[in-house]
Image (cartoon, grey):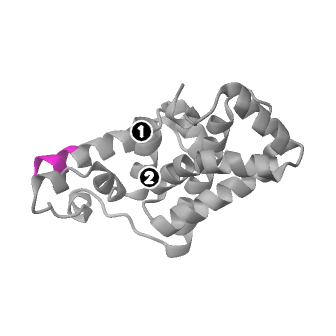
């Protein structure tokens, strides 16, 4: 069982909840929401690196899941299907934010400067979540999908609409930035 499938019930219970929710049982969908909301939020937060955006993406993912529930065929677990929806929502949010804000990504060594300064205590400096959140948006999204969520470069390329080589480059660059930050 993967982390995205972890919850407090058996697969049969999950299938029963999904079936009931597909039949319009909002109480069943509410249970699915309660079981998966924290996982969906965590994925959205890692990708967007912004709490309000992650909250909006979480709500949007559940709305989209409710609207598309009739199309859920059970080829994967409900948690996996929902996580994929959440990833798509968060990636779409990043794309829209970049278009609307016309952000200019710093290049080269400036990327290292954009990471937070070392903390005063070694324990605080090892806050990987904070360092990941400070990565450039594209590198952060691909790094989270690959290194944390376990998606293949091929799957990430499909999800993000980028070339496989670009995905690999983003993961490599994110690792370089994180390693450089750990050395300081």
Magenta stretch encompasses residue 111: no
- Residue 15 in picture, x, y percent from top left: 75, 31
**Would residue 109 appear left or right of 73 to someone viewing this image?**
left
Residue 167 position in % (x across, y down): 45, 40
Quarter of the rendering containing residue 92: bottom right
- Residue placed at 53% from the left, 66% from the top? 53
The furthest residue to the right: 23
Res 50 → quadrant: bottom left
Q: Are marks 1 and 2 in contact (CB under 8 Å)?
A: yes
Q: Is residue 106 visible?
A: yes
- Magenta span: predominant SS is helix
Q: Which residues are magenta?
A: 179-184
Q: In this rendering, would 119 be left or right of 8?
A: left
19 or 96: nearer the eye?
19
The residue carrying mark 2 is 46
Gap between marks 1 and 2 measured at Cα: 9 Å
Question: Which mark, residue 168?
Answer: none
**Residue at the spot 80% in from the left edge and 44% down from the top edge:** 69
Q: Quadrant of residue 4?
A: top right
Does 107 sit above or below residue 69? below
Element type where label 1 sits in the image: helix
Q: Secondary structure at mark 2?
A: helix
Look at mark 1 in the image and give the residue it sits on: 148
């Amino acid at each position: 069982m993967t982390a995205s499938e972890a919850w407090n019930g058996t697969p049969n219970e999950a299938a029963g909840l999904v079936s009931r929710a597909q039949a319009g049982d909002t109480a069943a969908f509410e249970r699915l929401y309660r079981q998966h909301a924290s996982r969906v939020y965590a994925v959205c937060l890692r990708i967007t690196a912004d709490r309000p955006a992650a909250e909006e993406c979480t709500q949007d993912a559940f709305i989209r899941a409710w609207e598309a529930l009739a199309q859920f065929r059970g080829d994967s677990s409900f948690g996996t299907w929902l996580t994929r929806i959440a990833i798509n929502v968060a990636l779409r949010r990043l794309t829209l934010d970049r278009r609307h804000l016309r952000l200019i990504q710093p290049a080269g060594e400036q990327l290292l400067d954009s990471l937070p300064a070392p903390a005063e205590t070694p324990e605080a400096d090892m806050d990987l979540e904070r360092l990941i959140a400070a990565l450039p948006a594209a590198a952060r999204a691909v790094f989270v999908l690959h290194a944390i969520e376990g998606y293949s470069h091929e799957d990430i390329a499909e999800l993000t609409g980028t070339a496989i080589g670009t995905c690999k480059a983003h993961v490599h660059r994110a690792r370089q930035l994180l390693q450089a930050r750990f050395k300081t």
